[in-house]
Every structure is written in C-alpha cells, then in structure tokens.
C-alpha cells in the first residue's frame, strides 16, 4: 500500500470516503482498537457482537475489519463469500490462535477420543479457520468469551465431554463457572508425549483444555491484587476470562470485553474499578467514566501489539486503494465446515 503522507488529516479523508460508500461499506471495530479508529466504525463490539454484525450485514458490499485476523476470517466465513472482507493491517494475527495448528489438533483428537469416545470439540473463536472447520466436521462448535458457558452446556446436554482449544484459561474458568471442580479439567500439552494425558487421569475429566494462552492476559499478579485490596478499600476488580484462574478467583468479577464494559457502567458515582484486560479498552473506559465520577484504573497496563497494528494511515490507504493483498478470504471448503461451527454458536443466542 502507498504510504500516506504525514501530517495529512487522515480522519477527515476517511470520513469523506466513508460517506461516498454509504451503506455499501460496513466498518467493524473491536473494543481493543484505539479510539481514533473506533470513531470510524459502524459497529463496535466484542468478538461475538462483531461476528453477529458480519452475519447480518447483507446490505454491505465490503466489510473492513479493524481487529485481528481470526475475527476477519469469521466475518468472511459468515458472509458466505457474498461480501468482500478486508483488513487495514492483514498481518495482525493472534499469538494464542497460533498456539494450536490443525496437524497438532488432529493428533490430539485421536489421542483424546482414543481414550474415550464421548468428546466434542469446542474452539474459542481466537483460532484459525482450519480449527473451526475441524470443529464443524466433528459435530462441535465455536464460542467466544461471552458464550463459552452456553457452548459447554450445549456439549454436556448431549452427554458428551468438552475438548476445548486453544485457551487453557478460558477453558478452566468456564468449567469453574459451571460448578466443575479443578480435577474435572485436564490440560492437553501439545509439546508433551500424548499431550500429557493417560487413561487414568481422563476418567473423571469433563473438560480437556489445550495448553494455549493470551500473553496480554498473563501479566496480572496476585501481588498486585493484594496491593489494591490493601490500598484501595472498596475498589472492585474485574478481569477478562483469558486470565489464569488463580487471578480470576481473586477478582470480584470476570467477563468478556462487552461484559466488562457493562460492569463498569453499572458502578455508582465515587466507585473505583480496576480492569484487567487490554489497555486501549481500559484507557477508553477511564476517559468515558471520569465525568460521572467513576475512577477506572488498569490492573496492570498490557497492550495487544496486533490490535495496535491498525491505524488511521493504513485504514485510509485501504479505503483508497482496496489492494487484493488486504483481502481476507478463507478457502471455500474450509469456510463451509467452519461456518457450521460458527452457526451452531450463533444459534445458542
Ligand atoms: P472478546 O471476545 O471479549 O471480544 O475478546 C477477544 C479477545 O481477543 C480477547 O483477548
Ligand atoms: Fe489474541 Fe490476546 Fe491480542 Fe486477544 S488480546 S487478539 S487473544 S493476543
């Protein structure tokens, strides 16, 4: 893409192009994007809301996804190839999604179902299209951090057990939310022989969770939480469920980005709330709630470098040039099976 000269007023130029496109263009922005990007978004949301938005966007010709690649892939899959999906920064990936590749997952599936047959795969949407397609083919589904509990219940209601990937922590936290003991959750480590599982340890397992994680949510510590409890009596702490269970259990609440936003909005004037998730969102919440006297603080500052790859310059360059290299297109056969898994999730409501 051509480099946009600085100090061009990218925001105004984006507004002009945006107006020309009208309803033929839908710009989606994840909560972790910078506010200057979200100002241009038609829909701002968490992964679930944006997937729903992409599925509903039948009037649009093009979708621009300001987020990371797995989200744009889901938008492409859910738009049945009818709308072209683009990213301002196509190299914005997700290290957690990269922690499970399809060859490893198929090997793990053979190992797990070889020990007992009653498993269904559940993939966090933070995963590749191939992993979602695998779930679709095997009778499973996807989930987001908003509806993971519903996805697990969907599996349990079929008298099956959950093979969850790629986030160990969302898997363990969701199992705990549903009242399962820690011993009902086993971790599959793709680097260990047979994943580190054996027939004995699997007997009481209800969930096997892939040993993957989000680096952005690994920085919160019990020491910091104890310090807050000591120094800020009455302050609330909320974290994203990608955070390890030891931290989640010390916090007052946990939830997806949309749930965090609602939690902060429900705090009364004078409250202080520490938020453990990506820093762009926390900074915006702090700005938005300052005027009504709610003090929003970062639990520990943590930025997602991939979310930060989208900026006004590459957004403007995309809207001017629409290069093929910026298009996100999942191969048709993979998309068909992945759509099955995503649509099973959307049907959960
Ligand atoms: P949400 O599902 O809460 O939007 O989170 C997506 C994500 O990437 C969190 O790291
Ligand atoms: Fe991936 Fe974590 Fe960034 Fe979310 S915050 S996109 S899980 S690296």
Image (cartoon, grey):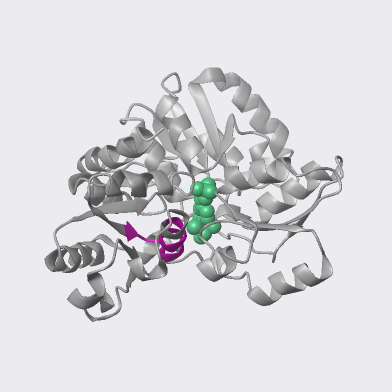
Q: Which residues are magenta?
A: 164-174
Q: Residue furthest bottom?
A: 193
Whether residue 4 is visible here, answered yes or no, is: no
Q: Residue at x 65, y 39 (%)?
A: 38
Q: Is residue 243 left or right of residue 342?
A: right
Q: Is residue 16 left or right of residue 164?
A: right
Please tell me in which quadrant of the rendered image residue 224 appears. bottom right
Between 342 and 16, the residue placed more toward the observer is 342
Residue 50 image point, x, y percent? 49, 37
Q: Residue at x 28, y 44 (%)?
A: 157
Whether residue 154 is visible here, answered yes or no, is: yes
**Residue 247 highlighted magenta (yes or no):** no
Between 178 and 144, the residue placed more toward the observer is 178
Q: Residue at x 28, y 42 (%)?
A: 341
344, above or below 240, in the image: above
* Quadrant of image for the C terminus: top left
Residue 170 image point, x, y percent? 45, 59
């Amino acid at each position: 893409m051509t480099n946009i000269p600085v100090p061009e007023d990218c925001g105004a130029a984006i507004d002009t192009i945006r107006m020309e496109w009208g309803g033929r263009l839908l710009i989606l922005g994840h909560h972790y994007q910078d506010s200057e990007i979200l100002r241009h978004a038609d829909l701002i949301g968490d992964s679930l809301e944006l997937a729903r938005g992409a599925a509903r966007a039948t009037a649009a010709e093009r979708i621009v996804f300001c987020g990371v690649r797995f989200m744009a892939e889901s938008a492409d899959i859910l738009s049945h190839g009818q709308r072209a999906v683009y990213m301002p920064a196509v190299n914005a990936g997700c290290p957690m999604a990269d922690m499970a590749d399809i060859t490893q997952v198929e090997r793990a599936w053979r190992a797990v179902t070889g020990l007992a047959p009653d498993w269904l795969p559940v993939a966090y949407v933070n995963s590749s299209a191939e992993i979602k397609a695998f779930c679709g083919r095997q009778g499973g589904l996807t989930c987001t951090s908003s509806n993971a509990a519903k996805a697990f219940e969907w599996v349990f209601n079929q008298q099956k057990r959950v093979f969850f990937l790629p986030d160990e922590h969302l898997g363990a936290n969701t199992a705990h939310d549903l009242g399962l003991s820690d011993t009902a959750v086993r971790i599959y480590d793709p680097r260990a022989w047979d994943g580190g599982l054996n027939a004995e340890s699997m007997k009481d397992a209800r969930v096997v969770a892939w040993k993957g994680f989000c680096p952005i949510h690994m920085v919160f510590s019990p020491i910091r939480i104890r310090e807050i409890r000591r120094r800020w009596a009455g302050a609330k702490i909320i974290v994203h469920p990608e955070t390890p269970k030891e931290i989640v259990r010390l916090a007052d609440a946990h939830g997806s980005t949309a749930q965090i936003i609602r939690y902060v909005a429900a705090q009364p004037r004078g409250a202080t709330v520490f938020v453990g998730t990506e820093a762009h969102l926390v900074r915006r919440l702090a700005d938005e709630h300052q005027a009504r006297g709610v003090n929003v603080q970062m639990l520990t500052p943590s930025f997602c470098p991939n979310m930060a790859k989208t900026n006004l310059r590459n957004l403007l360059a995309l809207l001017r040039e629409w290069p093929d290299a910026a298009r996100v297109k999942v191969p048709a056969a993979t998309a068909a099976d992945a759509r099955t898994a995503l649509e099973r999730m959307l049907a959960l409501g």
